[in-house]
Amino acid sequence: MDKLAKPDFSSVTRLPPADVSTGDDDLYSARVEARQYLEFYNWVLSIKGEYLGYGAEGIIYIFLFEIEPGRPEVNRWIWVIVGDVPPAFLPADDATTPFEVLDSYIGALEEWVEAAREGKSVAELIPVNVDATLAGRLKFLDERILPELKGN
C-alpha cells in the first residue's frame, strides 16, 4: 500500500470551504453525509481539503478528501461514495480517478451481494448495512453511470 499515492486531480473539482455554499442543496447534503461518514473513523484527525469527483443528483456522489491521518499507514487522500447506495471509502492508493473508484466500489459490492445471497460470511468484505436487493442499483451504476465516467 502506497500511503503517498495521489489521485488524478484533473478528474476532480475543488470544492469551496465547507462553510461556503455551492448553491446546490443536493450536493451540499451529499457533502455533509460524506464528511460525517469519514469523520466517524478514528484514523481521520481532520479534513483539510474537499473535491467533487462525480455527482448524479439523488443517485450517487463521489468525493475526494484530503485528511490529516491519525495513523502513519493511512493515505491522506480518501475517496468517499454516498447517495442512494451504501456509503463507502476507498484510499487513493486503490484508485486514482472517479471511474476507478466507482468500478472498485461496484466490484466490492457485487462480491458482497453474491456472498449474502449464498449465505456466506461477509465479515471480510466491504461493510454494508443493506440487504441483497442492492444488485439492481449496482447494475444501474455499472451500465449507466460507469460508462459516463469513463468518457470523462
Image (spheres, helix red, strand yellow):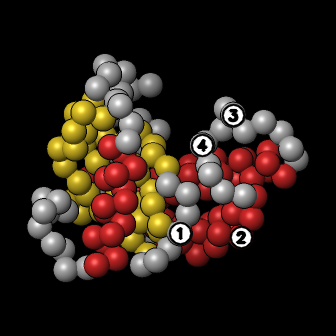
> Which residue is label 1 attached to?
84
Residue 50 percent coordinates (x, y) = 23, 54
Residue 11's disc is none
Q: Nearer the viewer, residue 96 or 108?
A: 108
Q: What residue appears at the point 32 percent right and 22 percent down from the top-left corner?
A: 71
Image quarter hosting the C terminus: bottom left
Q: What residue appears at the point 36 percent right and 45 percent down from the top-left corner?
A: 38
Q: Nearer the viewer, residue 1 or 21?
A: 21
> Which residue is label 4 attached to?
127
Q: Residues within 10 Å of mark 3 (few under 14, many from 20)?
A: few
- Residue 124, above or below 17: above
Q: Counting residues from the N terminus, which is met first, the one under dot 3 or under dot 2? A: 3
Q: Name the element at disc 1.
A: loop
Q: CA distance from mark 3 to mark 2?
A: 22 Å
Q: What residue appears at the point 59 percent right and 68 percent down from the top-left corner?
A: 141
Residues under numbered marks 3 and 1 in contact, where contact means CB atoms less than 8 Å apart: no
Residue type at the position of mark 4: Pro
Residues under numbered marks 1 and 4 in contact, where contact means CB atoms less than 8 Å apart: no
Q: Residues within 10 Å of mark 4 (few under 14, many from 20)?
A: some
